[in-house]
Every structure is written in C-alpha cells, then in structure tokens.
Amino acid sequence: MSDEQFDDDDCSIPCPACGEEIYDDVPMCPKCGEYILDSERRFWSNKPSWLVQLAVILAILAAIGFVLPWLSTLLQLIGG
C-alpha cells in the first residue's frame, strides 16, 4: 500500500489556535499541539459564508412573517 494523502475538504476544519487545516476527528492539532474541544466543532464552522448569511436572512424573514400578523392585529385594536 502507498502512503497517499487524500484531500477531502469535507473532513477538515481549521485549528482554532493556529489555523492549520486538520482532520475533523483528531483530538489534537499535529502542528501546534492544541487540543480540539468538541465545543469548537460547530455546525456552521465548515459551511460557506454565503450559506450562513442566507440562513440568517431567512430566519429574520421568518420571524418578521410570524410577528407581522400579531402586530397588525394589535394596531387595529389600538386604533379601533
């Protein structure tokens, strides 16, 4: 067998201490020796920034859509 290294971006994360790309299942960064805590493995950390921004915008629009009918009812009662 050969000692090939596989470049799989889906399985790597940046080290929170030094920024080196490391496999997401290692407990310690091989470059700087910093331990990788499970709390630092966030769902959005390895997602493209446009996807995170889109999710935030959609969440804000959903919140507005949920609050708007309540607000219009409240304004009708006050102005009534």
Image (spheres, rainbow, N blue to C red):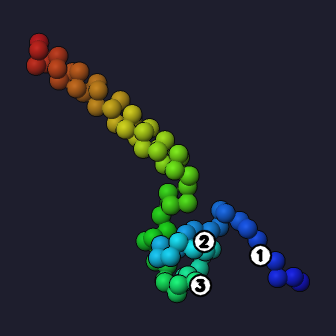
Q: Quadrant of the C terminus?
A: top left
Tell me the SS state at disc 1.
loop
Separation of marks 2 and 3 at Cα, in angstroms: 10 Å
> Which numbered disc flags the more N-terminal residue, 3 or 1?
1
Q: Residue at x 47, y 73 (%)?
A: 16
- Residue 17 at x, y percent in the picture: 47, 76
Separation of marks 3 and 1 at Cα, in angstroms: 15 Å
- Residue 20 at x, y percent in the picture: 57, 74
Q: Quadrant of the N terminus?
A: bottom right
Tell me where residue 73 sits by quadrant. top left
Q: Is residue 45 above or below residue 78?
A: below
The residue under label 2 is which amino acid type? Glu
User: Horizontally, is 8 left or right of 35 in the view?
Assistant: right
| Residue position for label 1 | 5
| Residue position for label 3 | 30
Q: Is residue 13 above or below residue 76?
A: below
In the rendered structure, find residue 46 and report the number of the disc placed on it: none
Res 24 seen here:
no
